Image (cartoon, rainbow, N blue to C red):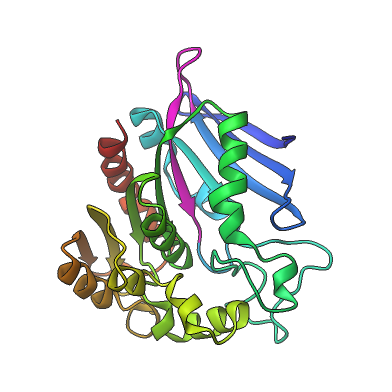
Amino acid sequence: MTIETVSTARAFGGTQGVYRHASSATGTDMTFSVYVPDHAPGARLPVVWYLSGLTCTHANVTEKGEYRRACAEHGLIFVAPDTSPRGEGVPDDPDGAYDFGLGAGFYVDATQAPFDRHYAMWSYVTEELPALIGAQFSADMDRQSIMGHSMGGHGALTIGLTHAERFRAISAFAPIVAPSQVPWGHKALGGYLGQDHAAWRRHDAVALIEDGARVDALLVDQGAADNFLVEQLRPHLLAAACEKAGIDLTFRLHSGYDHSYYFISTFMADHLAWHAARLK
């Protein structure tokens, strides 16, 4: 596996890198960032995956997430993929909307033309990129956790619930918990997967829990001043599903906080400490 180093910088006694590689899953070049704290030669560190939200690339959390101090303190590798394939020939929303197409892969493998040619973000995030991280970095792939924001919170929840044996911790900031029941999800799941609602359920955290997926615990933080809270996020649906399934959900609603990285960065260290306790 060959990767190109785009940039590296020292931060908090570690190395923040941005890398590019040719993806076989998407058929495009993909860019991702990795923070690796300094560590003893030969040591392998646990990995936290961070999945970003609509319109984002790897750069949003890398530049604004304020995770490096906590990752250095806890000895965590932090990996941030892009949110969709990009490049010449990659289809976008025909109307240029922000919530579908480029920057909005929704962490699914599309089955509908023309998106099925490149939009394979599920395979990319769950198979191809983990294999690359395990081969190229000092990562202990037996100790992984996953987190995300908004659309990426949806991805973290659905991937974590589907691969519960792989991830020791799952958390999210303002996640889309039930895409089958909200406008963002109707557009994305319909556009990528067609009208087979059984396929939608495999990419819907609430539906996965209703259909038997189980993990021990989840952590979700949500801003009470989030403009998307009522129409698109609807965390009460996740709370109800977790209560019925016996999943220990820690849900924190924060007065005054919105959907932005000001909110995420405020509680990032809390999430990383929660992950670290389960990864050690």
Q: Residue at x 32, y 35 (%)?
A: 279
Q: Nearer the viewer, residue 165 or 262?
A: 165
Total number of numbered discs in the rendering: 0
Q: Quadrant of the C terminus?
A: top left
Say above or below: 83 vs 73.
below
Counting from the top left corner in percent of width and height, residue 266 is at 33, 52
Q: Is residue 132 left or right of residue 279?
A: right
Whether residue 120 sits left or right of residue 61 in the image: it is right
Q: Quadrant of the N terminus?
A: top right
The residue at 57%/29% (across/down) is 137
Query: Residue pushed farthest top?
Result: 41
Q: Using the rendered view, name the quadrant where residue 187 is placed.
A: bottom right
Residue occupying image coordinates x 54% and y 79%: 189
Hey, which quadrant is residue 117 in on the image? bottom right
Q: What is the span of residues highlighted in magenta in the rendered image? A: 37-52
172 up-or-down from 79: above or below: below
Instruction: Tell me which corner region of the image, top left, top right, bottom left or bottom right, holds residue 67.
Output: top left
Can you see residue 98?
no
Q: Is residue 36 magenta?
A: no
Image coords of residue 267 (percent x, y) = 31, 52
Against 163, residue 205 (above or below) is below
121 left or right, relative to 88: left
Residue 74 visible in rendering? yes
Asked whether 90 or 193 is in front, the reply is 193
Residue 274 at x, y = what percent? 26, 43
Residue 196 drawn at (x, y percent): 53, 84
